[in-house]
Image (cartoon, rainbow, N blue to C red):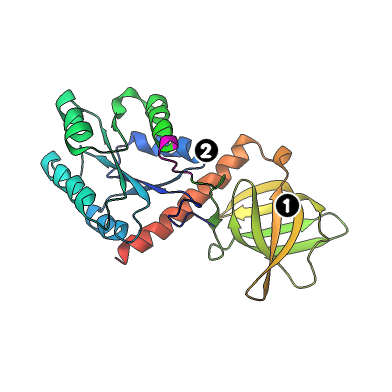
């Protein structure tokens, strides 16, 4: 499943009032399996962070609030016992040496001061190093996206067998699903030409049925993708779908706090 804020599952990474360049940067970060979100409500985010402090937030000083009010917001997050563990960084288009010194030295933000006018590639390079240094991926290798409510289905047919399953979660490594009654493949079966529909985006790949596990008395089936059947375009489709699902879930969470 997706990260829950613990070291095992990695840290959620928020860009607060993100500049336009971050839309492209977030896609690059996703390819390195970081879980990123774009957020514009700093008050709701602060309340959410009080319950999920194992997170990282990059504040855009150029939008949302005047810079002095951003300073106050950052100091409030860092000074509150409930949110003190949150890693804070700064992004800006027009950063000055005075601002950099204020946030890095005077305030002591731990996740850097990034001037994004250096472009997408350089900004992504800086942020990747920052997230690696702050162990934002945790112990997991891949972001797993819960999608039981997203209508994702797996369809498989090899001429002899047909199978259909509801997908419960998904990553570029594989998926958890529930096959229809009586349609479960034999363990270690090769599933060639699996078809997934990711909110209307078709994806074809080969997989290996690993087996099933019991969750509260209900069998959950595990399928790993054959890496040879997933090129970069297909991986980007999975990650793009995952970002949309996770962002929608986060938007709902923030709307409720």
Residue 131 located left or right of residue 58: right
- Of the numbered discs 1 and 2, the one sitting upstream in the chain is 2
Residue 188 on image: x %, y %? 81, 54
Where's residue 121, x and y in %?
42, 26
Q: Please give the name of the residue rendered at 49% of the width and 46% of the height, measured from the top-left corner.
A: 138
Q: Does the magenta stretch include residue 133?
A: yes
Q: Which of 247 and 71 is in front in this view?
A: 71
User: What mark, if any, has residue 31 been given in the picture?
Assistant: 2
The label number, if any, that marks residue 194 in the structure image: 1
Which disc number belongs to residue 136? Answer: none
- Would you say 113 lies left or right of 72 here? right
User: Quarter of the image containing the C terminus?
Assistant: bottom left
Q: What residue is at 28 percent from the left and 55 percent from the top?
A: 45
Residue at 73% x, 52% y is 194
Q: Over which residues does the magenta segment extend? A: 132-137
Q: Quadrant of residue 211?
A: bottom right
Q: Determine the residue positioned at 59% across, 54% down.
A: 170
Disc 2 element: helix
- Quadrant for the N terminus in the image: bottom right
| Residue 44 is covered by the magenta coloring | no
């Amino acid at each position: 499943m997706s990260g829950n804020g613990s070291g095992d599952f990695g840290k959620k990474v928020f860009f607060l009032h993100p500049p336009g360049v971050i839309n492209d940067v977030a896609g690059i970060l996703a390819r390195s399996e970081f879980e990123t979100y774009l957020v514009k409500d700093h008050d709701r985010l602060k309340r959410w962070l009080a319950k999920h402090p194992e997170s990282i937030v990059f504040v855009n000083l150029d939008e949302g609030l005047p810079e002095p009010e951003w300073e106050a917001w950052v100091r409030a997050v860092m000074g509150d016992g409930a949110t003190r563990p949150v890693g804070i960084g700064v992004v800006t288009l027009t950063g000055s040496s005075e601002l950099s010194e204020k946030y890095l030295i005077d305030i002591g933000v731990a996740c850097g001061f990034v001037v994004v006018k250096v472009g997408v590639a350089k900004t992504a390079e800086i942020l990747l190093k920052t997230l690696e240094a702050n162990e934002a991926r945790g112990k997991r290798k891949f972001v797993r996206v819960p999608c039981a409510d997203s209508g994702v289905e797996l369809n498989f047919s090899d001429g002899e067998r047909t199978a259909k399953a509801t997908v419960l979660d998904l990553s570029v490594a594989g998926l958890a699903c529930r096959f229809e009654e009586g349609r479960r493949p034999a363990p270690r079966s090769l599933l060639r030409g699996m078809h997934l529909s990711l909110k209307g985006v078709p994806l074809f790949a080969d997989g290996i049925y690993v087996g099933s596990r019991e969750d509260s008395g209900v069998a959950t089936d595990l399928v790993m993708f054959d890496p040879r059947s997933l090129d970069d375009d297909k991986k980007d489709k999975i990650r793009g779908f995952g970002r949309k699902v996770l962002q929608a879930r986060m938007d709902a969470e923030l709307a409720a706090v």
